[in-house]
Amino acid sequence: MAHDEAGTLERLKILRRDLFDPSIAAHSGRIVKLMGDGTLVEFGSVVDAVQCAVAIQRGMRAHGSDTPEDRRIALRIGVNLGDVIIEGNDIYGDGVNIAARLQELAEPGGVCVSGTVLEHIGSRTGIAFEDRGEQRVKNIDRPLRVHSVRFEGGKAASTASSAPVRQTERSASIAILPFANLSGDPDQDYFADGITEDIITELSRFRPLFVIARNSTFAFKGTSTDVREIGRKLGVRYVVEGSMRRAGNRIRITAQLIDAAAGNHLWAERYDRELADIFDVQDELTRQIVSNVAPRLQIADHLSAKRQRPEDLRAYDYYLQAKSLLDAPVDFADLARGREYCSRALEIDPNYARAHAYLAASYIVGITMMEVTDPVEWEARALASAERAVALDDLDGLCHHVMGEAAFLNQQPERALRHIRRATTINPHDADILTLGSYVEISAGDSERGLRQIALAMELNPTNPPWYHWLKGLDLALLGRFDEALAEYDQFGPPNPSILKLRAVALVQLGRLDEARAIVRTLLEIMPDLTASTIAKLDASMPDANVRVESLRRAGLPD
């Protein structure tokens, strides 16, 4: 402040806007009040509080990396867990006073927590702490046990624990495990998986239910893990497991609902039906699960908003095969085969909304993965297919979410936002929709909402599938947090051309030109004809398109 009062205040405002406030929002915190150069923040979860503190300090290190030492802003953070007195929007009490004393004990750039905090979080965060012993502080009549976060190389050091961070288990939290395929034909796995995913999608419509996403539950496919262990790892109270046997036009489905904490079976059922009745079985399963997990939910409200089903089961079969390829394509061949299956489904049933939606998705993913270098035609195809999907089924969250993506790609941001929000209204706990929507929200200027969505998606999908890190990296890059974006890109593997492109951009923005140039050389080995002009076409709809193109030019990509 003595050197540059106005400049310091301006930098503090920037830190609040770009780092502090978004981090608090992403961890579900509430700013109670500002106190000069201090801030009091309240969290509903002590795990969230500690993770937020670490994220802020990590971001501070990156933010000040190019600032002279004597001009660098540093924060001290204290975290305490305790009762508070609420008066209006303010909070008081010993819990607040101890937090204030803890921040005084922290080193600049450090985080101190009370012994109570450490007792409650245990090893769940994977963050390493140093025991600072008992400390006597002003106006507190007893010594405090103090621990500080151990930072190494700008990051919080990890403990040996690999247990995922979980929120306090919700009373109506549930994981649907992949139904086992007992048909004796491994090629029928896609059908069993599709039935499981449809049940997850239908359950995600219920706001009071916290439904773990498919990517996380499918991590247990083919394992014999005890359901109590699964419940602990995923942080859920209930688990559904079952099996599917398909023979000719007959299908047998068994399902059971288990209280994961106690290991008790709460409900079990077997369905022997004609294959044409598969959707009735899905509805009945959903109804049974909901009525046993949360009996006060209004099931009729849900059933009145069912999505449209195909008229011919063969179309559904082709759609499931397309979905299995397009949800996680390995290469361009997967995209082409998925597109072909969508076309076959639509030949059989031209009014099948989901087949239109996935056909649109195949073009969107193809553009993203740089399957084509001139995207104009595919952007138009994606938009047309998505519009057809929504027109056919206005109550399907998937159709609206694909429509939002297609509109965004066609540089229609307001329309994109409208459909993305419609999708989250229909399926409020669909982690995929939340993840994809976060980028549209941040692009529209609502960084708080976007970060909150990606944080919830990561919680709903605790195994964090690779493409979530891709999207989270895009979110962070839009906010100028390129060090964090790079860390997310690094978790996507094996790197495809699009990820290589984004990594190069982040490295240029971090001043690591030599590393960026090496990545561009690799990119040109894969795509020898790639130019900055091509990137300008592919990324035209992206808010940071100019940053990407100029960064890649600096890294050696030819014009």
Image (cartoon, rainbow, N blue to C red):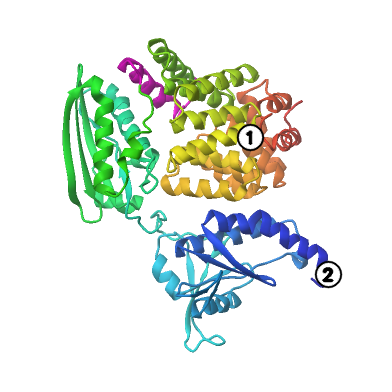
Circle 1 sits on which residue?
414
- The x, y position of residue 269, in whole percent, is 17, 37
- The x, y position of residue 326, in whole percent, is 45, 26
Q: Secondary structure at mark 2?
A: loop
Badge number at residue 3? 2
Residue in the foreground of this view, choosing between 129 and 301: 301
Predominant SS along the magenta part: helix
- The x, y position of residue 187, in whole percent, is 29, 22
Instruction: Judge left or right: residue 223 versus residue 149.
Output: left
Q: Of marks 1 and 2, which one's residue comes earlier in the chain? A: 2
* Front: mark 1 or 2: 1
Reply yes or no: does residue 463 show up in magenta: no
Reply yes or no: does residue 330 show up in magenta: yes
- The x, y position of residue 84, in whole percent, is 48, 75
The quarter of the rendered structure image containing the C terminus is top right
The span shown in magenta is 310-332
Q: Identify the residue at horizontal 57%, vertical 27% (top origin).
A: 406
Q: Identify the residue at horizontal 25%, vertical 56% (top origin).
A: 261
Instruction: Judge left or right: residue 252 versus residue 343.
Output: left
Residue in the foreground of this view, choosing between 27 and 155: 27
Q: Identify the residue at horizontal 43%, vertical 31% (top origin).
A: 395
Q: Compared to 103, does 196 lie above or below?
A: above
Residue type highlighted by circle 2 = His
